[in-house]
Image: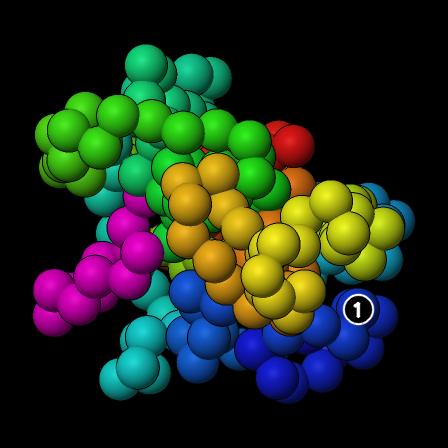
């Protein structure tokens, strides 16, 4: 489903809160088989990125390294933005903020995180740098099972994050995805995984 829009075969969940209102139903990317796509949708959420002004083609700007064509973090987590032709930036993924590990397990030095600059442009094997983007996130961890251990001592409707922040349990349930991928499809129709990370 997209944020609040059901798509056949997907789980009924609103997806990552930071992408609320910035997605639409996604077709299966060309580099994924129908069988594998069905399996991904059983355990996760997928949608095509769409900017507030209706654009669906983006450049990817990132902080990190490329490993076999994938954007990965180094000593500090990766940071990935989608950027429209008009310059609107949409935060797709911040490994220091997004996903289960970043929320409940890991912490980083704030000064080092502030030095990250998403100034590299992703280019695929065809030399293309503008793409339609499909984002998939996985929800294999049932936070309901962990609710008691994650709950804030003063308010059971809140959970305490690794950085000390407290957020509503329902928000955490959608934000604490345990895997993420971003598939970039260029103007020739070639689909490439630009980002793929396990987050728990």
Q: Residues within 10 Å of mark 1 (few under 14, many from 20)?
A: some
User: Residue reaching furthest front?
Assistant: 154
Q: Position of residue 20 (x, y in %)?
A: 46, 75
Horizontal side, residue 17 vs residue 111: left or right: right
Q: Position of residue 107 (x, y in %)?
A: 40, 29
Depicted 139 relative to depicted 158: above or below: above
Q: Position of residue 148 (x, y in %)?
A: 77, 52
Residue 134 in sight: no
Q: Quadrant of residue 170?
A: bottom right
Depicted 100 relative to depicted 39: above or below: above
Horizontal side, residue 185 vs residue 36: left or right: left
88 within the magenta span? yes
Residue 157 in sight: yes
Total labels: the figure holds: 1
Q: Residue at x 42, y 45 (%)?
A: 164
Horizontal side, residue 159 vs residue 186: left or right: right
Task: Please identify the quadrant where the C terminus is shown.
Answer: top right
Q: Nearer the viewer, residue 197 or 159?
A: 159
Q: Which residues are magenta?
A: 80-91
Q: Residue at x 23, y 43 (%)?
A: 61
Q: Position of residue 135 (x, y in %)?
A: 53, 55
Q: Could you say whether the residue bearing mark 1 is in a helix, strand or loop?
A: loop
Task: Please identify the quadrant where the N terminus is shown.
Answer: bottom right
Q: Nearer the viewer, residue 151 or 18?
A: 151
Write down the residue under mark 1: 11
141 within the magenta span? no
Q: Residue at x 26, y 25 (%)?
A: 109
Q: Residue at x 64, y 85 (%)?
A: 5
């Amino acid at each position: 489903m997209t944020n609040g829009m059901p798509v056949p075969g997907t789980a009924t969940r609103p997806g990552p809160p930071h992408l609320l209102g910035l997605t639409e139903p996604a077709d299966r990317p060309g580099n994924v088989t129908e069988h594998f796509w069905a399996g991904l949708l059983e355990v996760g959420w997928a949608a095509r990125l769409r900017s507030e002004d209706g654009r669906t083609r983006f450049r990817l700007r990132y902080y990190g390294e490329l490993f076999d064509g994938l954007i990965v973090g180094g000593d500090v987590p990766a940071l990935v933005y989608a950027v429209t032709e008009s310059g609107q930036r949409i935060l797709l993924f911040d490994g220091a903020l997004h996903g289960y590990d970043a929320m409940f397990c890991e912490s980083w030095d704030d000064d080092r995180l502030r030095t990250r600059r998403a100034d590299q442009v992703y280019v695929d094997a065809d030399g293309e740098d503008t793409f339609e983007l499909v984002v998939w996130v996985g929800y294999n961890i049932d936070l309901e099972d962990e609710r008691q251990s994650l709950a804030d001592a003063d308010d059971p409707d809140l959970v305490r994050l690794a950085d000390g922040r407290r957020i509503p349990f329902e928000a955490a349930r959608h934000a604490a995805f345990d895997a993420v991928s971003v598939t970039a499809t260029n103007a020739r129709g070639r689909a490439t995984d630009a980002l793929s990370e396990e987050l728990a």
